[in-house]
Amino acid sequence: MKIHDNWKIKHFDVGAARDLEVASPDYIDYFWMTSAVPGDVHSTLIDRKLIEDPFYGHNDLKCQWVEEKVWWYRNTFEFHDEISKDDRYELIFEGLDTFATVYLNGVELGSTENMFISHTFEVARELKKGKNVLAVKFDPVHVHVKDKVQYYWSGFSKKRIWTRKAQSHFGWDWGPRLVAAGIWKDVHLEKRTLAKIDSVFAKTKSITQEEALIEVEVDIASFTKDKEYEVRVNLSLGEEAFSTKVKVDRKKAKVILAVENPKLWWTHDLGTPHLYQLKVELVADGVKVDESLEDFGIRTIEVLRKDENGNHCFTFVLNGEKIFAKGANWIPIDSFIGAVPDSRYLHLIKMSKDANMNMLRVWGGGIYEKEIFYDECNRLGLLVWQDFMFSCALYPDYNKNFMDNVTEEIIHVVKRLRNHPCLALWCGNNENDWLYEALYSSGEIHHPFYGEKIYHELMPELLEELDPTRLFWPSSPFGGNDHNSREEGDTHNWQVWHGNIEPRTFGEPQSVNYSVEGLSFKNFKNDTTKFASEFGMHASSNTYTLERNIPKDQFFWGSEEMAYRNKDIHHPKGILLMEGYTGVPKDLYEYISFSMLTQAEGLKYGIEHYRRNKPNTSGALFWQLNDCWPGTSWSVIDYYLLPKASYHYARKFYSPVLLTLDYEPGQDIKVWVVNDTLEVYEDEIELAVYQTNGEKVFSKVWKVSVEPNISKQVSVVLEQEALCGLNPEGAVMVITSKNNSVEEDFYYFRDQKDVKFEDAEISVSVDHENHELIFSTNVLARMVTIEMEMEQLVLEDNFFDLLPNRKRRIKVHQAEGKPIPWDTLRVKAINSVKTRGL
């Protein structure tokens, strides 16, 4: 049974209350406040209006006291079962954040110190018929780490290295410090009779067109030895079912299923992510005592490290097909993870798929995600790069207690996640190997590489036993002479934005170039990486998001509150990037537009380069997909799940078939087709050049036939030929599929700040019946922007360029089905005369 109702919470000062008194069934908690479980302390206080919204203004600073207190949860539930000698009752907490002590009817069951794993207590003797009282005490982090060493290198906080909780709770360069506590996942009381299924490991051993062999290993925990145990395994899809059974030997069972005419699990861009249902039953003397049900995808996954010619590569291979990984880095979905509804996960992952992404990287400073995340990636066909939760720090691998905690965590996490077909790779940490070596060489770190034993000894040993079916990658980035080498492995390109001077080699100090040229996204074109797993640049959140979280008297460019939205300490980086492309903004609304356009065009510039460089480059996962609060960050979707310009650009630059121009001012225009599909791409494509008044001055059409899974340059056009005598500052190139199989795309001959736009007058009307907006313009409109006062607004397209003499129809809906606030509609472009509303 689930224990999710009737929870109450209260805080105490450290040492102010006797634990056994508060845990006692006789303790009077009548005036404690009710609290949702799953959830957290902060969310309860927000709901009760006991703290002001931490995301508004500087309010996060007002609630720092929350992390200093001891927090108690109490619950009363009824129990009326008859308990026999063959029964056990397990009290299961799927997630306790973090230093918790659990009591049932005044009996201390045990303590926990790891947010990432579930905790199980056997309670058959402690349960009472009728009323039972469950109490959980959460200690503040400082009580457990105050006497620990806190001067090792650790970004953003020194205390976090000793705590196995979401590292970003302590603040990061995209989010505030909000150290949550509470019961953040479900609580269950489960009856076990005679034995239980302890774990299941299902793996695809081989695939042919006619047959797939699936091996299923089952571990059981039995409470009595005088029974004969049997495991029955069934794998089904629709009307098809494949079954077998085997006796349990020494608490283990292994079966092989032969699946005829297997339907494979593919990423959505290559095929259908078919999911079978895997049912495992545990039988004792012919009677079923336990059952496990989960989805299973028949597929093989590997990472190719050397190509056919012996050259270094880093290419994911799915069902024998090389893929180009297209996607983003996923950070925690909220600062308060426990209170997030599943619907938020569903929408954000669907947005990823709709933007043609086929991989998400779960970043190593957050959490091992909730089951809903992996289930939805399975269902929608997105691969997952899974980091272990170690990031940007030295971790005390010399401490036995810490290492025992980490060992339990790795075992638990791998067993929980290894059956998900979406899971493509295990990665030991985020940036620890690279940054340690670079900062040690620069003289900023003097300690040994604490944590090395975790990623280079403990993890590989455990994964060889628990999941040998996937590549274990020690760190990201990793490989080569400098762990961020472009010669092998994966890389994080922080030359753009952070100004890192690359390449460097082991032993060289890390140097930076904070200048317009040093930070420019044009540096992406020099990157020959095998796999780009992190790179990006800031952009503002949407106007609606900022307006809801910044006081009105501070809603201007340069205000202290606006600066507070940006948690990256080097604020000039964004200005330098804009200075190089759009020019420096003069006010807040120009900043919102300029930063969004710079991010969008910058990501487009880099990712199209990476894709043209296929197969030498085999993946691009930009930083970052989402936000945990309404700030200014590298995200392409803001906290209210409103896309920035770069999200809509991503749908085009991640399209399975990409029509792309490789062009620099004054040079030839190279026309490319990138075909990531497994079929020949045949089409007619047109390159056209327009004046800003819409007059077409140049057109060239090619019939193309591009083989599956390759990148191909199809032609070259001279710049002078394309311009036909036009000034390059007054012209735009548009590349189009004549069969409308790919969205058209716009390219400019010069940077935004140098283009001479005319004043655009945008006309907009609403088709209420079809939930569509209809647009037209008198001259070329740059970055037409649709705004409404509604979160989770879904627009078919936004931040698009529009030529005159054309109409664009854009479908609109709200993710949760709420009415569209048409009366709040505002439409503008960078070069529009004014903002238009209804």
Image (tube, rainbow, N blue to C red):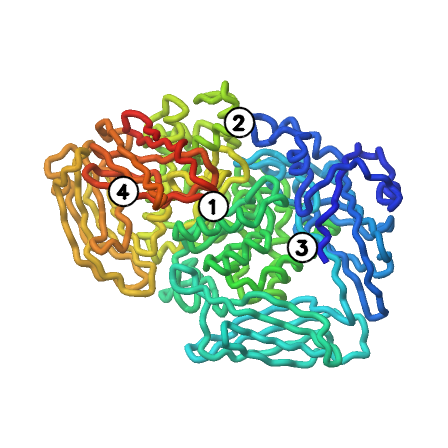
Q: Are marks 2 and 4 in contact (CB under 8 Å)?
A: no
* Nearest to N terminus: mark 3 or mark 4: 3
> Which residue is at 45% across, 72% downward?
263
> What residue is disc 4 on?
808
Residue 142, picture quadrant: top right
Name the amino acid, label 3: Glu
The quarter in which the C terminus is drawn is top left
The Cα–Cα distance between marks 1 and 4, rounded to whole angstroms, is 24 Å
Circles 1 and 2 in contact, beta carbons < 8 Å? no
> Is disc 1 in contact with disc 4, using a CB cutoff of under 8 Å?
no
> Is disc 2 placed on a helix, strand or loop?
helix
* One can see residue 109 in this view: yes
Q: Nearer the viewer, mark 1 or mark 2?
A: 1
Q: Which residue occupies the foreground of this view, 600 or 156?
A: 600
Residue 522 seen from this side: no
Cα separation between marks 1 and 3: 39 Å
Q: Nearer the viewer, mark 2 or mark 4?
A: 4
Q: CA distance from mark 3 to mark 4?
A: 52 Å
- Left or right of 166 on screen, residue 324: left
Label 3: state its secondary structure. helix
Q: Nearer the viewer, mark 3 or mark 4?
A: 4
Q: Secondary structure at mark 1?
A: loop
Determine which residue is flagged by label 3. Answer: 409
The image shows residue 472, relative to residue 539, as above or below, that is below
Mark 1 closeness class: few <14, some 14–19, many ≥20 residues within 10 Å:
few
Where on the picture, by quarter, is residue 127? bottom right
Cα gap from disc 2 to disc 4, whole angstroms: 38 Å
How far apart are labels 1 and 2 at the CA level?
Answer: 33 Å
Q: On screen, 339 above or below 16? A: below
Tags 1 and 3 in contact by the CB under 8 Å rule? no
